[in-house]
Every structure is written in C-alpha cells, then in structure tokens.
Image (tube, rainbow, N blue to C red):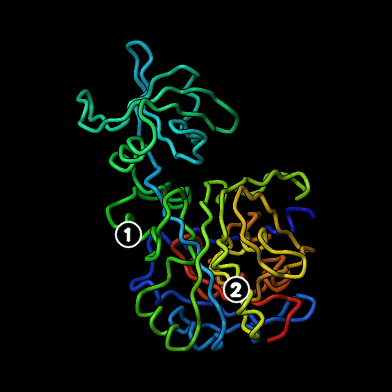
Amino acid sequence: MRTDLFDFVLPDSAIALYPAEPRDTARLLVVHPVKGGCARDDADLDDKQVRDLPDLLRPGDALVFNDTKVIPAALSGVRMRGETRAHVDFNLTKRVSDNTWRAFARPAKRLEAGDRVHFGHSEDVCLQGALDATVAAKGEAGEVELAFDLSGAALDEAISAVGAMPLPPYIALKREPDARDRDSYQTIYAEKEGAVAAPTAGLHFTPELFAALDARGISRHFVTLHVGAGTFLPVKAEDTDAHKMHSEWGAVSRETADALNAVRARGGRIVAVGTTSLRLLESAAREDGTLVPWSGETAIFITPGYRFKAIDLLMTNFHLPRSTLFMLVAAFSGLGTMRAAYGHAIRNGYRFYSYGDASLLARADQSE
C-alpha cells in the first residue's frame, strides 16, 4: 500500500511533553466497530477517561500487558581522538553481545570506527562509575556499534548509573529528561529489563485502576516484548512492501498462553494493552487463534489486509503519521475509521504520542 495513505497533519501543540497526573485521568477515545471499516462521523466515538475502562469492558475479559522494563538508554558522551574531543549523544537500541550495543548517535558525523567515547565524565574530571567504549562499527542513518570496556551485569549497572531515560525524539528535542521521567516513563508493573522505549499504553495504569478492574472481574496477564527504538521511526519507503521492519525480542509463557486460551473458551475477550502486546500475541498465535508458548525475535509488520487471530480489543496511544503503528491500528479498525478517529482527536484536543492520551479500539471485522 502507498504510505501516503497513512499521512495526516498533526499540530505541534498536540504532542504531549508530560503525562497526565494522576496517570488514569488521561483521556480515552472509544472507537466502536463498523463493518468494513468505513469512515464515520463523531457519533460513533465516545470521549471517556482511562479510569472508565472497567465499565467499558465485560466481566471475564482479559487484559494483556507488556511487563518489559525500560533501561536508562540515553547516554551523553565525549569522543576522544588524539587531543581533540567532541560531544556526541547516543540512544542505545539493541544489545548484540555481552559488551556490545547498537545505538543511534547524534551527530554521527563526528564518529569513525575505532574512536574512543567516554561516558559519565564531568568536563575534564573522570567520575567514579564512568563508562568507556570503542566505536566498533558505523552504519547508515546514524547507527553505530559500541563495544564497552565492561560487560554483563557490570555494564548494566554502569549504564543505569550514567544513563537517562530514552525519551522519544519528539519529546527529547523539546526538553531535557528530568528526574520525574525515571518513574513517569515506566509502567507500574515493569519487571524485565531490556526495553529502550516504553510500552506507552501501559503508562496509564494505576493501583487504583487495577483494583477497579479486579472488582469488575477482568483478569490481568503478562507477556514480555523488549521495545526497540525503531518503534518511533516513520516509514520512509513510498510503499509498505519496501519497508524493512525492526525486530524485537519477546516471549509468551505457557502459563499466559493457557490462561488466555481458557478466557477465549469461556467467551471472554482478549484486550491487548499496547501495540507491543498485540504484535507479540499475534506472533504466538496459530491460524485458529490458539496461543502457544513462544519466544524469539519478531519483526511482524501489520498493515491493512492482515487477518487478526488472537486479539479482540486494543488499547493504544495516538501514533505518528506514516508510522508502522498507525498502519497497525488502521489494519485493526479500518483506515477510514482511524482517519476519522484521529481527526476527532485532533479537533478535540487529545494529546498525542508517548505521554499522550489513549484510545480503545475494536476490530473492524467484529461487532460488540
């Protein structure tokens, strides 16, 4: 499909720089199903808050969360080349060995293979816990490989000490990360370290909302997908067939697969909290919708025409124009439907992207 079909104009003022407080007071646009996914008017959309979610679901439904934990993957370094120095910022994107990470460098033009980079230094003074690396390779579009002097758990500890939360570019270019982001850019149920971007739909949940969902008889289940920085990138190809999807590591346990199969057998609906949960469950689903234990790299790229097997409802934030994630929601609820929903959101002041508001979507091929 032509990627310009997934383009839209978003006012700069619509990009949220900070989350709603409390988290569950964020707005929630409920998008009702329409056969064929045709464009609709605003009468088919309901303006709610995330804290209304228990009343929007049914007893016996199941929410599926991504329990990945974001590491402080934004590093500020000094490139050393002889007597010359240059400041370079890095966002770690994927671990490739015990001591090596891929990263996006900015500005990458200041780097060459073999350069030494120091992190955790203050001007000319080396701080305790400082971290050093060598540029092992330089790729295209600002990507490099960093071979750190430390490895394993020692490297993890050093990155945690000197790194900052890796806010997405549309936030990081407008403000510096601050101490609040260590909590704000992490779900309350984050457990397994490895993500370099947050599963942002999950940022809206609070202990109070969990308690209300429990009281309503809605179960919670967890999968793990370590979100990569590629989730923020727009599709630059003119046709979706020419786009190479980034891969991410994920796992669905036998316990979760069996529990969700039982939910479906009882007539309950499976509700993915975030596109990461959806992509992982669809990767682990058989053609008949049955879920099986699964782990590995997934590069599933979902565009209109995809037949969903495992998911009935999707809760997700509002995404970038021409992004793989807007293509995914267009596949889920229909392109016309989502263009109408996003138009409504823009006109009515919804906040977009990672710290923004949320939507609750039903599949175009199902009725409530």
Against 100, residue 331 (above or below) is: below
Front position among marks 1 and 2? 2
Secondary structure under the numbered disc 2 in the rendered image: helix
**Residue 91 on image: x %, y %:** 44, 40
**Left-right relation of 340 to 70:** right
Q: Which residue does the image show at 45% across and 33% down from the upper left?
A: 98
Q: Which residue does the image show at 46% across and 84% down from the upper left?
A: 52
Dividing the picture into quadrants, the one containing residue 85 is top left
Classify mark 2: residues with Cα within 10 Å, few (<14), some (14-19) or many (20+).
many
Residue situated in front as seen by the camera: 36 or 152? 152
Which one is earlier in the sequence, the residue at label 1 or at label 2?
A: 1
**Residue 87 on image: x %, y %:** 36, 28
Against 274, residue 208 (above or below) is: below
Q: Quadrant of the N terminus?
A: bottom right
Check disc 1 and give the amino acid type: Asp
Check disc 2 and give the amino acid type: Leu
Residue 102: image tag: none
**Residue 7 on image: x %, y %:** 67, 57
Classify mark 1: residues with Cα within 10 Å, few (<14), some (14-19) or many (20+).
few
Q: Which residue does the image show at 57% across and 76% down from the upper left?
A: 360
Q: Disc 1 and disc 2: Cα gap in Å? A: 30 Å
**Left-right relation of 22 to 312:** left
Residue position marked by numbered label 1 in the rendering: 183
> How many numbered badges does the structure rendering display?
2
Dividing the picture into quadrants, the one containing residue 209 is bottom left
Q: Quadrant of the C terminus?
A: bottom right
Against 129, residue 73 (above or below) is: below
Secondary structure under the numbered disc 1 in the rendered image: helix
**Residue 242 on image: x %, y %:** 76, 44
Residue position marked by numbered label 2 in the rendering: 260
Q: Residue furthest top?
A: 82
